[in-house]
Image (cartoon, rainbow, N blue to C red):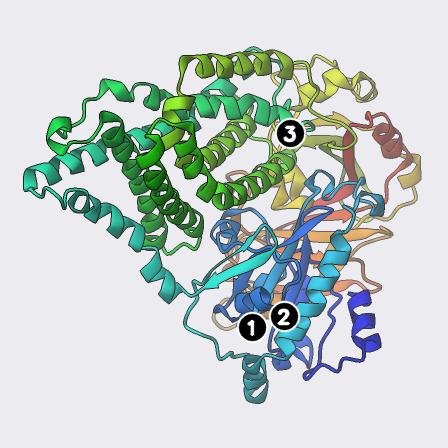
Amino acid sequence: MLEVARLIVDSGWVPPRPVIFLFNGAEELFMLGAHGFMERHRWHDTIGAFVNVEASGTGGLDLVCQSGPGSWPSRVYAQSAVYPMAHSAAQDVFPVIPGDTDYRIFSQDSGNIPGLDIIFLFGGYFYHTSYDTVERLLPGSVQARGENLFSIIKGFTNSSMLQNFYKLASSEITIHQEKDDGAIFFDYLSWFMVFYSRRLALILHKVPLAVFVVMPFLLNLRKFSMTSCLATFSDLTKGFLLHALGVFLAIVSPIMFSILRLLFTTFSMHWFSHPYLAYLMFIPCSLVGLLIPRAFWSCFPLSRDVPVLQASKEELSDEATFWGAFGFFSSLTMAYLLAGLSGGFLTFFACISMLAAWLSFSMAAKYYGHRSLRSILFYVLPMVPYLAYSVYFGGFLAQFLIEKTGMMGSIPPPYGYFIPDIVVSATIGVVTSLCIGPLIPVCGHWLARSSILRFLLQIIVVGFAVSSQFFPYSMAAPKRVVLQQTYLTSGPNHLEESSYELSVVDSNSLRFLFKHAPDVANALQTDSHLTFETAHLSGQENWLALFPVSFMFSRSLKFPAKESTSRKDLHFPYLIDSKPQTISDDGTRRVYLELSLGSVEEVWVTVLNITGPLSNWSFADNKLPAPEKLNGGPPSYICRLSGASDENWRFWLEAKSQEKLRIDIAVLDQKLTNEVKWVKSLFPDWVDVIAYSSFMSTYTF
């Protein structure tokens, strides 16, 4: 951002409108910095557009993962980006991902401002770890991002729509936006952008299905009869069901293989630090599933009469399988459209490419025959642009997902052990069916030969044997471990209990960790072959300082900690009455409180969990959030206070009855004791330890 600001000045370009560079913090604490700017800064009602610069990794191409409101921001990006990378399908997926960015504050919660959410996605192995250093940046990433940003800023500031808004700006953030909220856009290999409106998509994306519906009539124009049309429709339906079954098996086969493989191994995610293992294991499985229906296609007789139509059996068979597969992709395109999603461009691209390939193949088949390799080449060549894009899109998706499985959360067994492998194998199955599926109708009779199927099965067996020899983690792909030293306190000077709490955020549990890191197990005075039945489990309530990230933890463990010499003179955080309670005429009770952080030095966040008849508070403009439930407990209200404070925090709470209010406080301190530093140093270099102290106390008022 500093370099872009320097470039604007040194380039001599004068922006037609002011450009604000907002360096805000506390994004990880639920966008507190962006919220503060939009609620309190005098410039907040002059903003015409924004670009949120994000990262979920150490580089790669920038992906526009969110755009709106309206289609104007994505159109500006399509016209301006030097190295475009944007998929409207990302907007379908992002809302279901457990993550958030400042984009929400500007475009939804505190404003209706149009903008872009641009994010680094590759290098996710190092995201939020101590390995996330400058040296880990993927070369060229920051340069490409800077060139994109500079061009996009020019595009926004020169846009007539931005100028229209700027003239109409008032104290209420409004925006003259298009009603077209579902524009379709995607980049082609980062070379250029394809952009078209939702209105146009409503027309274009219906065309493939319309073509499929009328094909039984078009194929019988020379000798038209309802009997022949019905017979053709029957053959095309068989082809449709055949391809649908192949896609289903292409997804299910790698899933079944992954489950079977894990039954014979002691840990999962062998492919985590070696992504090529996932491709080696799951792509052949998916191909076998995709080809199995094609191998049995000859067992299903055609409904059309070959002698009457004066066509070869191969020609009618190719027609049935091709138009059946075409109908499958056209149905997916229509399903995306009817669901109001924006990801149908990929299947629409497949449909258009298949039509061009079929025309080329049909002309070549007249000269070389339907089973000629030359004819097949004429089918494949028009498919090359689609094949290149589907491999680009699918490879990007699979790699991103593999990197993120290291932080997708620890789900309790027995299912949690299998979930990462199932998710990755299913994704690779979907990608394989999208990449290879359009080739199967014409190339399937070559690919479904018994010799090729046996070869694929041999690769699967090799992958089964080889994968179990690989360790899932390395310094380049570390395992994430959370180490919390918990202090249960009462008052500023009284320590009731001190303990170490340990958790992981992937499917390989603490049992796996202690087995491969025995020094840590010895330091925590536990057996490297521990069982969860005899260990002391740590409940989610003990991880209040990290709420709601704590929902990613399961089967966390608790170990006794020695008294720390470096904490003896420490004053702990505490809560007291700041003045007497008051009771209003309607019986509402107001409690005035004062929170002191004691002598804690490096506070990242203070979390208050309030349970009871709370009706109002002095936080968040006197607005209560939706209640939360911790570990099946009663509904409670959670408030986060960011950072340290020179003065004590004073606030009030209102209760609608005389029932006591319970307040649980957790203060996350980033300063580590010498004992925690020693325990942290015992972990092997393939583990990244997120360590901190949590001061917890409970009060009733």
* Element marked by disc 1: loop
Outermost residue toward the bottom in this view: 167
Residue to which mark 2 is pinned:
50
- Is residue 497 in view from this perspective? no
Of labels 1 and 2, earlier in sequence is 2
Q: Is residue 389 above or below residue 295?
A: below
In-front residue for pair 503/380: 380
Q: Which residue is mark 3?
A: 275
Image point 75% across, 63% down: which residue?
A: 649
Report the residue that reaches farthest toward the front. 367
Residue 533 x, y percent position in the rendering: 60, 16
Residue that appears at 68% across and 27% down: 274
Identify the image quadrant of the C terminus. bottom right
Tell me, yes or no, if residue 305 can be seen here: yes
- The secondary structure type at the circle numbered 2 is strand
Check residue 113 in the rendering and tell me which mark sits there, or answer none.
Answer: 1
With 306 as the anchor, is 336 left or right in this view? right
Judged by depth in the image, the label closer to the viewer, 1 or 3, is 3
Point out the tag, 1 or 3, that comes first from the N-terminus: 1
| Residue 155 drawn above or below residue 56 | below
